[in-house]
Image (cartoon, rainbow, N blue to C red):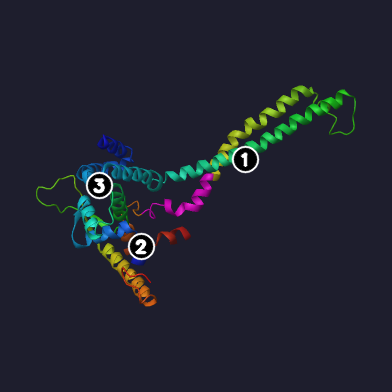
Amino acid sequence: MSRGLYRCLLWLHPAFFRERFAGEMLWIFDQTVGAEGAAALLADGILSLIRQWLIRRMTWKVAVALAGALLQVGLVAALTGDHAARRSSRIPAASASVAAGRRDSPMQAGPEASTGVAPQSLTISAAEPVGGKALPFAVLLGVLFGYVVQSRLFGAASRPAARGRAADGRTQAGQLRAGAKSPLSIVAD
Amino acid sequence: MKPEAFLPLSKATLYILLALAAEDRHGYAIMQEVIRRSGGQYRLGPGTLYDNLQKLVNQGLIAETSARSMGDDPRRRYYRLTRPGRRVLAAEIARMEAVVREARRHLPATSPGRAV
């Protein structure tokens, strides 16, 4: 039972880590489960799973970007909703004043004065498209904002050289021995 | 990069480098050595161990080696301490010695098992 659970945990790890270490980890599980206890090993497996996906695979950056996007969407939706509510409440009031025959100012004259469209139809068409068009734009803006923020804050960690192994396969220590710039100086450049 | 750039080492990293200082070992042997060196007070789980091994290989402080004993399980990977890894370990030990020296200078009456 516990072995099956541990195998499931290993199977959920990122492919690179799983292919490299899962066999040995399962073998160690079999060797140590009697002495260590299954609970401790399963807890270690869960922590390893979280670490591999969120920290080593940088998936947390996507989470940060999504959080930024949701924040933006919420903010823009709240603002456009408020704006649309104000417009829809103002237009009927204007049409009521038109019906009453009052023409106090050009702003209160009602939309039909310039457009020739009935006020009731404007009330609906003015309120709905604001949110409808703004939402995809807000999502796009939010994702961009989240991406920019996370790349500004954590950009150094996502560079291949800074992660330890460069594209040519040399390690951090190897590059530094060869006189390459440190990851921090690369970022500073 | 100077070895000091890697300092201070985490507990897991320190014990892994110490375990590999004497000889090349595979993962399970490293775990056993860590338990032995810490007097059973520190135990590495397989997930923590292999995460750290992967990180240390990427940093070039340890390397996989093909050295295997006869009749050994071919799935086992052996690791050895590289020269930069040895320098980092030496720097960490020097750092810890400096901490201990400083502590002794300020707390001369303190000794293990004796409250101040």
3D distance between C-alphas at marks 1 and 3: 50 Å
Of circles 2 and 3, which is in front?
3
Q: In the rendering, at what x and y percent does residue A157 appear? A: 42, 53
* Element marked by disc 1: helix
> Which residue is at the front of the view, A186 or B50?
B50
Q: Which residues are magenta?
A: A146-163
Q: Which mark is residue B6?
A: 2
Image quarter of residue A20: top left
Residue drawn at (54%, 43%), measured in percent from left and top? Answer: A68
Q: Which residue is mark 3?
A: A36
Image quarter of residue A142: top right
3D distance between C-alphas at marks 2 and 3: 31 Å
Of circles 1 and 3, which is in front?
3
> How many C-alpha atoms fall within 10 Å of the one at disc 1: few (<14), some, or many (≥20)?
some
Chain for mark 2?
B
> How many C-alpha atoms fall within 10 Å of the one at disc 3: few (<14), some, or many (≥20)?
few
